[in-house]
Amino acid sequence: MEKTDVLIVGGSAAGLMAGLTVKRRHPEKEVTIVRKASKTPVPCGIPYIYGTLKAVEKNLIPDDNFIKQGIRMHTLAVESIDRGNKTADLADGTRIAYDKLILATGSRPAMPPIPGMQTGNVFGIKKEPEYLAQIQKTLESSRKVVVIGGGFIGVEMAEQIAKMAPANGDAAKDVSLVEMLPNCLMLACEQEFCADAETELRHLGVNVMTNAQVQAIQGNGKVTGVQLASGETIPADAVVVGIGVTPNIDLAQQIGLAADPRLGVKVDAYMRTEDPDIFAAGDCATKFSFFDGQPTGIRLASVACSEGMIAASNLYDPLRKSMGAVGAFGTMVGESSIGAAGLTTKAADDAEIPYVVGEAVFPNRHPGALPGCVCDMKAKLLFHSETGSIIGGHVRGGDSTADMVNIVAAAIQGGLTAEELATMQYATHPLLTASPLGYHVMLAAENATAKMNGKKSA
C-alpha cells in the first residue's frame, strides 16, 4: 500500500494548483495527484486547438513541471474511498493511504435533455485529450457545423471552427451559433459588447442565431440537422454543445459527502467539506457570489486555481478564506477583445442595486498613430451609487483588455471607490497603454464621480 500525506483527486486547474501550494507551504509533505485523463489540457485553450493550434498536443500542461516539485502523479480512476481508514483504491488495485484529501474532480459538459442528443457527431467539451482529438477529426471532415450555446465556450468554439482551413479544397465551413437569449455572452457582458462579439462572428461568416431554442437533434446514427423551436432545421454534419458545465460529484456522493447535482460538493468558505480531513475545490465544489453570498454557477479556471490554493493552504490550519466568486472574464472574438468583471447593468437592475455608470473611450496607445492602436477602446464601469464602491466593469479594445479587467476585478474585491480609482497611479507607456491623460479606468471612474457628486450637490 502506498502512503501519502495529501491525496488530490483530479488533475486540472484546482488539483494542480493545490499540489503546488502544498509543496510550497509544506515541502516535507508527500503529495499525490490522481487523475483519469492521460494528460491535462489547458482548459481555456481548448477552443484554440481547432482553428489556431491545430493539434491537441499543443494544448497540454506538461507533467514534468509538477514531478520536478516532488509531486507523484497517477493516471487512473479512483474506484472508491474509505473515509474511516483514510484510504483510496485506484482502478488498477493500488491502495493509497492518506492524511488529507482534496477532491478536485472538476465538471462535465452540460448536455440538455434534447431528443437526439446521443446521436453520432454531437459533442460536449470534455477535458480529455483523446476526446478532444476525436472532435478535431470530425470537425476537419465536416462541412456544416452547429454550435449550441452562445456563452464564452460556444462563442470561442464557433470562432475557431470558422477559422479552420477547408479540407480537400472544400469551401469554408458553414458554421451556425444558436443561443436562446437575446445576445451571446449576455450573462457576463454589457449588451453593446455582446453586439460587438456577434458582429465579429458574422464577419467570420458565422450564422449567429439569437432568441433561438433547439428542439431536437436529427439524424440516424450521425447527426444531419438541428431542429429549432421555430420549426426551422439547420443542416449539420457535426454539433458542438457549449452551454456550460455541471459539477462532477459522483465520487463525493459515493463516499457520503453532502453534494448537490447542480451546485456541487458542499464546502464552507475555507473549502472544507463536512469531513474535517476532506476538502473540495474547483468546478466540483459549491460556489457563492462575492456580491450577495448566494449560490452561483460561475465556474472558471481562475476561480478553480484560487480555490485549489485556498484548500491547500487550509489543510493543517484555516489560513485563507474564499471571498466568493466575482466572475472575471476575457475573450477575443475576431479582432475585438472583450473583458468583464462583476455585475452587468442588467444584473444590477435585477438585484435592485442602485448604481452609477462611468465610461471612457480613448485610444489604447499614445500617440494614436503608433502600431497596434485601437482608437475606440472603451471602459464602462459600474459603481454603487450609495457607497461609491465599484461593482462591475466592462472593457472592449486591444491586447490590454484582460489586464485592465483584472484591475477592475481586484478593485471590486478590494472595495475601491470611484474616487480611489480616479486618483490611483497607473503605469503607462506609449506602446503598451493609453495616455496618462486618458487612461480608461481612471477616466471612467472620474466620469462616475462627477455624476455622484452632482447628485450629492443637488
Image (cartoon, rainbow, N blue to C red):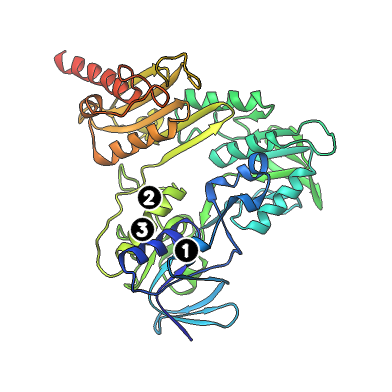
Identify the amino acid type marked 3. Met
Q: Picture coordinates of residue 53 (x, y %)?
A: 64, 43
Instruction: Specify whether 373 is left or right of 60.
Output: left
Location of residue 199 with respect to 82 vertically, above or below: above
Residue 118, image quadrant: bottom right
Residue 426, image quadrant: top left
**Is tag 1's residue or tag 3's residue first in the polypeptide sequence?**
1
In front of the other: 229 or 209:
209
Q: Picture coordinates of residue 406 (x, y %)?
A: 37, 37
In front of the other: 176 or 445:
445
**Is tag 3's residue or tag 2's residue first in the polypeptide sequence?**
2
Q: Nearer the viewer, mark 3 or mark 2?
A: 3
Report how many numbered discs are placed on residues in the image. 3
Q: Picture coordinates of residue 369 (x, y %)?
A: 47, 13
| Residue that carries the numbered disc 1 in the rendered image | 66
Q: Residue at x 34, y 38 (%)?
A: 409
Identify the amino acid type marked 2. Pro
Q: CA distance from mark 1 to mark 3?
A: 15 Å
| Residue that carries the numbered disc 3 in the rendered image | 309
Instruction: Specify whether 151 is left or right of 135.
Output: left
| Residue that carries the numbered disc 2 in the rendered image | 295
Q: Secondary structure at mark 3?
A: helix
Q: Nearer the viewer, mark 1 or mark 3?
A: 1
